[in-house]
Every structure is written in structure tokens, then in C-alpha cells.
Amino acid sequence: LYVSILKSLFSHISAENTDKDGTFTFNTEFDGLVSKKSKSKKNIKYLTNDEVDRIISYLDANTRDSSHYSYIYALAIKLMMFSGLRASEVLNLTLNDFSVSDQENGEGEQDLYEIHLEETKSGDQQKTYIPIWRIEFELEYFHNLIGDNEFIFKAKNALDDEVIKRNNLYRAVNQILRKIGIKKKGLHLFRHTCAMRAYRKSGNILAVKQLLRHKDEKTTMIYACLLYTSD
């Protein structure tokens, strides 16, 4: 993104300050510095603010019917969309992995859950955060149903170590999206959405890197470039 902006600047300078013979431009100085975007980067999908609102409205209304799986899907989607968790990380959570963070907001309130992650892509122990009000209704349901050391995302009568399959979560989430008229699909859609919302709000790519727990900021820059080209 930075190189693209600099290239535009020097291209403008070149147009205004060519040599007498008109042969020199700054563009050639940048050849090879900007790599072509890969197909995967171009195909990154994320939800608009309106689509996020529609999903949350649907989930909050649906969990009121006390269906066990409605709580499963609501909590999973919210964790991916508002804390940037991967689906594999969500499915390995227990209630013990949630604790009230010591961090305080501007009013001196502790309003965040700290989520401790044992099973991560890097294999390292990590942590992330989510506002308490986002998921307190769903967590209360599971606190009344299972023990603190049990996996959250499992069938109601399943064994302690028998979590639901990723493929089943994938199909269920896509069905929810279709029900509310959203044509996008996939579980990583919510992590992308979390990243884009965070970057739009803060404009701080390092904060987004920390949120997503990327090791390399080049990975995080995908979202900045996507926002830059889409705008």
C-alpha cells in the first residue's frame, strides 16, 4: 500500500518535471517493487455493516427459542466476528478459557472477556478479547448446562471430548446466511469481517495485527490493501 502511494506521488512528479528530452520518468524506479496481487487476496470476502446487523438480529432472536444449537451457532459466529478467532480455535474452547479482563474502559469498568487460547495455528498459547455484552447471554446458557472444563461446542448429550465437526459448523453457518439473504459463505468470512471493521475504525494496521495474532505484518497488510483498492 505504501509503495503504491509513493509510486503515484512520483508519477505525478514525473509528469510535471520531465527531462528536456522527455525520456525519464520515476515509474521505472519502482519496477518489481510491487508484486501482483494473488488470486486469494482478491477473493477475500467480508460482511458489510448492514449484513453484520442482520446476522446479529437473527442470532439474538433465534436463541430465544432455547434450541441448544441456536446457542452453539450464535456464540461461534460472534466469537469469530468480534474477536477474530479462527473456527478451529473456537471449537476447542471451554468455559475456563474465558475470564474477565483486568483492562478497564474510560469509565473504569472491566467490560472485556479475555479468551485464553491453547490450540492456535502457531501452536503457541495466545489470548484475545471480546466485549462482555456481546456474548454474556450465550455464555450464561452454557454455564448452566456444562462444567467449566468441558468443551462448549458439542452436541447436548455428547461426550466431554466430542466437539461438533468443523464441516457441520460450516454447513450450519452457511444455512443461516442463506436464510437472511446473504450470498457470501464460509467460516473465515467472519475473521475477515473482524479485521476490516477493526481497520476501518482504528486505521492502525499494527492494532489489527495484534487482534488477529499474525506473526508477520505483511499478512495483515492484505486488509489495508483490500480496503484501499475497494474505496
Image (tube, rainbow, N blue to C red):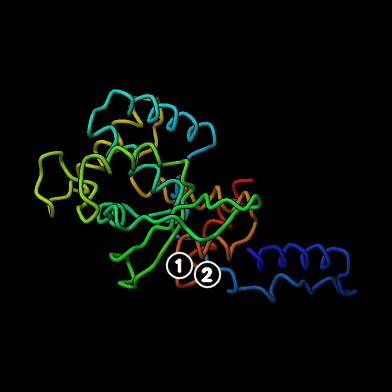
* Residue 169 falls left or right of residue 210: left
Check disc 2 and report its element: helix, strand or loop.
helix
Q: Quadrant of residue 119?
A: bottom left
Image quadrant occupied by the N terminus: bottom right
Q: Residue furthest right?
A: 20
How many numbered marks, from 0 up?
Answer: 2
- Measured in 3D between alpha carbons, the distance from the residue under mark 1 to the one under mark 2, in whole angstroms, is 7 Å
Q: Secondary structure at mark 1?
A: loop
- Say which quarter of the image contains residue 13: bottom right
Position of the C terminus by quadrant? top right
Identify the residue at image location x=13%, y=52%: 160
Residue 182, located in which quarter of the rendered image? top left
Residue wearing tag 1: 214
Rendered location of residue 49, percent (x, y): 54, 36
* Amino acid, disc 2: Glu
Q: Is residue 172 left or right of residue 42?
A: left
Structural crowding at the residue carrying mark 1, measured as other residues with C-alpha within 10 Å and reported as few (<14), some (14–19) or many (≥20): some
Observer-nearest of 141 and 27:
141
Numbered circle sitting on residue 199: none
Disc 2: CA contacts within 10 A as few (<14), some (14-19) or many (>=20): some
Q: Is residue 8 left or right of residue 105?
A: right
Q: Are marks 1 and 2 in contact (CB under 8 Å)?
A: yes
**Tag 1: residue type?**
His
Residue 177 versus residue 212 in the image, above or below: above
At 46% across and 47% down in the image, what residue appears?
82
Query: Could you say where residue 58 lies in the image, as x and y percent from the top left?
Result: 39, 27
Query: Which is nearer the eye, 178 or 230?
Result: 178
Q: Which percent across, then down, holds residue 222?
A: 52, 60
Which residue is at a point 29% across and 57% down the rendered structure image? 96
- Residue identified by numbered label 2: 217
* Residue 201 pos. (x, y %): 63, 49
